[in-house]
Image: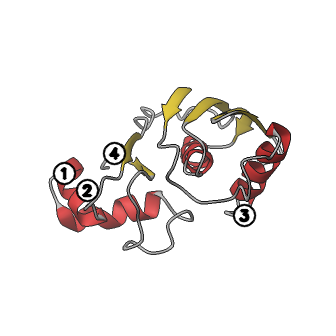
Amino acid sequence: MGLISFIKNAGEKIFKSEEKREQEKADLILSHIKKFGFDTSNIRVAVDDSKVTLSGKIDTMENKNKIVVTAGNVEGIDTVDDRIYVTKPAPVTPPEPEKQFYTVKKGDYLSKIAKQVYGNANKYNIIFEANKPMLKDPDLIYPGQVLVIPPLT
């Protein structure tokens, strides 16, 4: 939980006009999250200028992280206040380490990022799979986009 920063002028353009009221923006972001197949029945979205606050509950840490990056990778949003909690009980085995985030820079591609974070460019598919359904093609990433980087298992 906490604040995650994004680049305000990068991301999917879901706001057709800057004149939209905050509630309309919140509704658009919630619809944007839903279109990727996430259960948003227990998720609430509030927008205050360029900050999105997400609250409620979700089943897994994986889905939580994906919802946070989906909301943040919207043009006009530069901060996500993550107040979502995970409902799935903690496993008896040691918990999975929390994933890290990576902001794509100009000239980046998934294998380059994989080489940087894992030491092996061939592990790019791990990053791609962790960011589905937001990523539909491993070659289609853009500067300013925030990706979930899962730990190696």
Q: Which mark is residue 151?
A: 4
For marks 4 and 2 on the same chain, the one whose residue lies earlier in the sequence: 2
Residue 94: give x, y in percent of width and height: 42, 32
**Residue at x 30%, y 63% (from the top left corner):** 110
For marks 1 and 3 on the same chain, the one whose residue lies earlier in the sequence: 3
Name the residue that disc number 3 marks: 35
Name the residue that disc number 1 marks: 116
Name the residue that disc number 2 marks: 113
Compared across the picture, whether 31 is left or right of 59 comes to right
Q: Secondary structure at mark 1?
A: helix
Closer mark to the observer between disc 1 and disc 4: 1
Q: Residue 53: name its quadrant.
A: top right
Crowdedness of circle 1 by 10 Å Cα count: few (<14), some, many (20+)? Answer: few
Compared across the picture, whether 136 is left or right of 76 comes to left
Relative height, residue 50 to residue 131 (above, below): above
Relative height, residue 125 to residue 49 (above, below): below
Assign the N terminus to one quadrant of the image. top right
Whether label 4 touches label 3, CB < 8 Å: no
- The front one of 130 and 60 is 130
In the image, what residue type sits under mark 4?
Pro
- Alpha carbon separation for disc pair 2 and 3: 27 Å
**Residue at x 78%, y 43% (from the top left corner):** 26
Whether label 2 touches label 1, CB < 8 Å: yes
In the image, what residue type sits under mark 2?
Ile
Residue 48: give x, y in percent of width and height: 72, 30
- Alpha carbon separation for disc pair 1 and 4: 13 Å
In the image, what residue type sits under mark 1?
Gln
Q: Secondary structure at mark 2?
A: helix
Colouring scheme applied when the structure was drawn? secondary structure
Closer mark to the observer between disc 4 and disc 3: 3
- Alpha carbon separation for disc pair 4 and 2: 13 Å
For marks 2 and 3 on the same chain, the one whose residue lies earlier in the sequence: 3
